Amino acid sequence: MTILLTGAGGQVGSALVPLLAPLGTLVALDRSALDLADEQALQAALRQHRPHLVINAAAYTAVDQAETDTATAFAVNARAPAVLAEVCHRQGAALIHYSTDYVFSGSKPTPYLETDPTGPLGVYGRSKQAGEQALLESAAPSLIFRTSWVFSRHGHNFLNTMLRLGKERPQLGVVDDQWGAPTWAGSLAQATVAIVQQALAGASSGLSLLEFFQTHRGLYHMTNQGATTWFGFAQAIFQHCAHCQARLLPIPTRDYPTPVQRPANSRLDNQRLALVFGVRLESWPQALLHCMEAHPALP
Ligand SMILES: NC(=O)c1ccc[n+]([C@@H]2O[C@H](COP(=O)([O-])OP(=O)(O)OC[C@H]3O[C@@H](n4cnc5c(N)ncnc54)[C@H](OP(=O)(O)O)[C@@H]3O)[C@@H](O)[C@H]2O)c1
């Protein structure tokens, strides 16, 4: 099996590389090898490698920057998935794509279901929502995994920011009225690969890889279990960082203004993932522990 992975240099992409490599021939392309905003390059890469499975871990994830860089955000998050879906359908390939809690407004008081109406608050959320829609309207055998608050020791994310500021600042105000599930890129990679392995095992029981994806196509929420606020997440991070001395202060969202409003409730209900695939990610504190064990915070 040939697997083509986009965004191989990102948090989720780089966690996927070592887990996908044993499954077949892995073509792992980071942004320098494949720019998703370049439609011709995207088409050419799919023609050249003729993958059986495409995993799209690339995305324009700069939430505030997307407000002024709308065309690029839509090219990468909406147009590129549409092209991937069209070519995968034509070439007979399966497709895995990731999306975000930011497709929701956050006004629902309980965890969001896959069937809940979307209502993004900014350009990033709208571009990701358009990407989802393109896949759902296409005939491509595709799975979309919506996740939230992704962290790893690699790249720009809340975990690495807290580990840095915790050493630099005497005190830190952190938002305590937005709720969500911090989700480790390693957990997302493990869950994704578990589902790919089910698809491959299906081949031995008469269901081909494509039939497996066709049977189960659609949207799934995929986050670590449990929920907290950014303040709660920061407190947990500091428990893994002996050198983080900053005093943490809980603050309301209005005291930390950003160009784009964030959903107050980012919680995603993971029942569908458990029911269909029997996959349940570990709790976010366990995932944080595993992440920090793999890459401890150095002085
Ligand atoms: N990060 C989060 O908190 C979060 C939350 C919910 C959902 N998600 C979703 O989860 C998925 C994985 O995100 P992540 O957390 O791994 O984000 P990430 O660390 O920002 O990785 C995204 C990768 O995409 C690459 N990329 C950006 N523009 C590109 C382009 N034009 N062509 C090719 N590659 C490009 C980036 O390259 P550069 O590093 O060179 O820019 C980066 O390596 C995405 O679909 C994202 O929307 C993320």
Image (cartoon, rainbow, N blue to C red):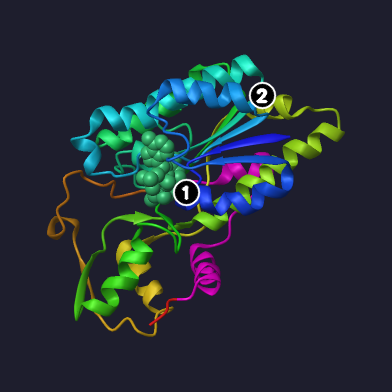
Q: Earlier in the sequence, mark 2 or mark 1?
A: 1
| Residue 37 at x, y percent in the picture | 37, 28
> Considering the numbered disc 2 on the image, is that residue within a helix, a strand or a loop?
helix
Badge 1 density bin: few <14, some 14–19, many ≥20, Cα 10 Å: many
Judge whether residue 135 can be spotted in this image.
Answer: no
Please tell me which residue is depicted at 33% across the width and 49% down the height of the picture.
Answer: 265
Q: Quadrant of the N terminus?
A: top right
Separation of residues labelled 2 and 1 (CA atoms): 28 Å
**Residue corresponding to mark 1:** 9
**Mark 2: which amino acid?**
Gln
Q: Nearer the viewer, residue 35 or 262?
A: 35
Mark 1 C-beta to ligand 1 under 8 Å: yes
**Residue corresponding to mark 2:** 214
Ligand 1's quadrant is: top left
**Mark 1: which amino acid?**
Gly
Please tell me which residue is depicted at 43% across the width and 78% down the height of the picture.
Answer: 240
Please tell me which residue is depicted at 54% across the width and 74% down the height of the picture.
Answer: 293
Please tell me which residue is depicted at 28% across the width and 79% down the height of the picture.
Answer: 167
| Residue 79 at x, y percent in the picture | 39, 23
Badge 2 density bin: few <14, some 14–19, many ≥20, Cα 10 Å: some
| Residue 36 at x, y percent in the picture | 42, 31
